[in-house]
Image (spheres, rainbow, N blue to C red):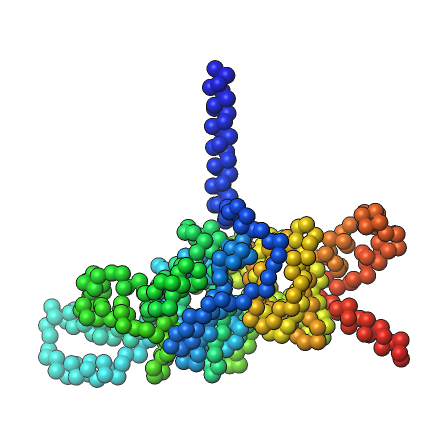
């Protein structure tokens, strides 16, 4: 009887552990592999592979790198030349992107949503054909009149209809949900540069931690999204079906069905548009100013105000008027999260845009509930990162085009020396939170003086200076500039 009770207790314990693991996965926390987050030394990372296309290129960071593997993300940079079209593609993971340079037209196809953009102007040839048919039609009886009206309605159909199309420009952050196809066209006069992050550890990705690209058009002979897929030619999804099946499904002839498979197409996934690029879209507001601030949506909203089909997918965070933290002659920081862009609540990602001028710094801080992938968009700056053992695991200069992975809880500081430093940070939480180690809202500010004095073995007066000397919350002058300012006063 005792053995049976012990067996029941052991079985119940195993069930509790399994239930905890399943609950962990359902909450979006991926199970960590052994030694996957060995982060004793961090590096400044650069793109390792470049896949060239007819009208641009895609640069990939190796997602198997230990830092990116630990964060559960994959990063790519898209460079679309003038007149280039990034063909429709979807992923099994949520995707968040930032427009570093240029402007364009972007479209996403959300499964199950209707085509809300319609062109009601029929073609000129169609109009002439309708007029000729009206002149040739004899008088019809009542039985034929209904058929004539039905035919006339069909003749007055739309020339084109598709899902929502949006204008994107430098400074835009836009999000794509898993399984939603996305395309983008460069309508500007300079290359359109986009940095994008895939959250491959997200709970919505039910496959392994490998980025998988599903192309609806094109044929990439050079490979794919980094890693093992680089060695394989990647064709579009139509290529795997029999042409007869495609013809029957789309009600077209077999020869046209074979064209969808792009068997002889070597242009890659970014192709050059021949002639004008005509899509149904509203006129661009002039001048193209930042969007008016919308009322933030809270968790209590029932979703009827904004459905998944009409949900905004992008927000511009480059406008200084949009800043959350701003200090003249020092810099600014702007964040976008699920309160300002509700679609981020669904994909569980957020972003922060920062700019500091010469001899400025971001006060030491750490991310409370997210990993951070910091990408330098301009200038040069110094980044120091400290791990959970109090060891300095990174102390390097970061320049344009490089990125750094800052794990959750790791404290870091950003400094600029002599020039501006600009960056975009993607965070693996829809409402990422930070905690500062210095400043008016820091951990030190919340501690009693007696704790500081005894913890660091300093006098009460020194503890007071440690706690109250820094009045800023996020941005301040670096020590070098303060020392120079003091020397100028002394010399005067």
Residue, x 50% and y 33% (percent of image)?
16
- Is residue 337 in sight in this rendering? no
Q: Residue 76: image x %, image y %?
A: 48, 66
Residue, x 84% and y 54% (percent of image)?
463
Residue, x 73% and y 53% (percent of image)?
443
Lateral position of residue 277 relative to residue 393, left or right: left
Q: Residue 241: image x %, image y %?
A: 24, 60
Observer-nearest residue: 320 or 30?
A: 30
Observer-nearest residue: 99 or 409?
A: 409
Q: Residue 222: image x %, image y %?
A: 37, 68
Lateral position of residue 386 relative to residue 166, left or right: right
Task: Using the rendered view, name the quadrant where residue 234 is placed.
Answer: bottom left
Observer-nearest residue: 456 or 445?
A: 456
- Is residue 171 in sight in this rendering? yes
Task: Using the rendered view, name the quadrant where residue 133 is placed.
Answer: bottom left
Observer-nearest residue: 161 or 421?
A: 421
Lateral position of residue 191 relative to residue 273, left or right: right
């Amino acid at each position: 009887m005792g053995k049976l009770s012990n067996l029941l207790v052991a079985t119940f314990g195993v069930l509790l552990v399994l239930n905890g693991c399943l609950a962990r996965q359902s909450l979006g926390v991926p199970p960590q592999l052994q030694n996957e987050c060995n982060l004793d030394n961090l590096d400044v990372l650069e793109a390792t592979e470049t896949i060239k296309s007819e009208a641009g290129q895609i640069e990939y960071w190796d997602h198997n790198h230990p830092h990116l593997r630990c964060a559960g993300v994959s990063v790519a940079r898209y460079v679309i030349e003038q007149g280039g079209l990034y063909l429709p593609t979807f992923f099994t993971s949520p995707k968040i992107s930032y427009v570093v340079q240029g402007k364009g037209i972007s479209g996403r196809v959300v499964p199950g949503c209707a085509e809300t953009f319609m062109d009601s102007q029929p073609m000129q040839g169609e109009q002439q054909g309708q007029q000729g048919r009206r002149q040739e039609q004899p008088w019809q009886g009542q039985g034929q009149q209904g058929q004539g009206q039905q035919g006339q309605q069909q003749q007055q159909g739309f020339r084109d209809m598709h899902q929502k199309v949006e204008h994107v420009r430098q400074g835009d952050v836009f999000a794509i949900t898993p399984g939603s196809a996305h395309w983008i066209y460069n309508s500007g006069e300079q290359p359109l540069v986009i940095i994008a992050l895939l959250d491959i550890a997200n709970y919505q990705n039910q496959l392994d931690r490998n980025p998988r690209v599903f192309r609806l058009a094109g044929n990439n002979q050079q490979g794919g999204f980094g890693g093992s897929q680089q060695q394989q030619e990647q064709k579009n999804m139509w290529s795997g079906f029999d042409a007869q099946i495609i013809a029957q499904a789309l009600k077209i002839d077999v020869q046209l069905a074979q064209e969808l498979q792009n068997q002889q197409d070597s242009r890659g996934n970014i192709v050059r548009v021949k002639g004008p690029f005509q899509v149904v879209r509203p006129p661009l507001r002039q001048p193209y100013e930042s969007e008016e601030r919308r009322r933030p949506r809270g968790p209590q909203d029932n979703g009827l105000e904004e459905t998944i089909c009409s949900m905004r997918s992008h927000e511009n965070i480059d406008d200084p008027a949009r800043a959350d933290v701003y200090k003249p002659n020092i810099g600014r920081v702007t964040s976008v999260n699920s309160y300002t862009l509700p679609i981020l609540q669904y994909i569980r990602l957020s972003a922060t845009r920062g700019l500091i001028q010469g001899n400025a710094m971001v006060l030491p801080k750490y991310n409370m509930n997210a990993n951070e992938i910091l990408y330098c968009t301009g200038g040069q700056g110094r980044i120091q990162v400290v791990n959970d053992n109090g060891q300095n695991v990174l102390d390097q200069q970061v320049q344009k085009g490089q990125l750094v992975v800052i794990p959750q809880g790791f404290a870091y500081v950003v400094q600029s020396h002599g020039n501006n430093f600009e960056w975009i940070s993607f965070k693996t939480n829809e409402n990422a939170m930070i905690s500062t180690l210095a400043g008016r809202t820091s951990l030190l500010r919340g501690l009693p003086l007696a704790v500081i004095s005894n913890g660091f073995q300093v006098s009460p007066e020194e503890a007071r200076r440690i706690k109250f000397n820094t009045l800023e919350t996020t941005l301040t002058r670096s020590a070098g500039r303060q020392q120079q300012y003091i020397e100028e006063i002394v010399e005067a």
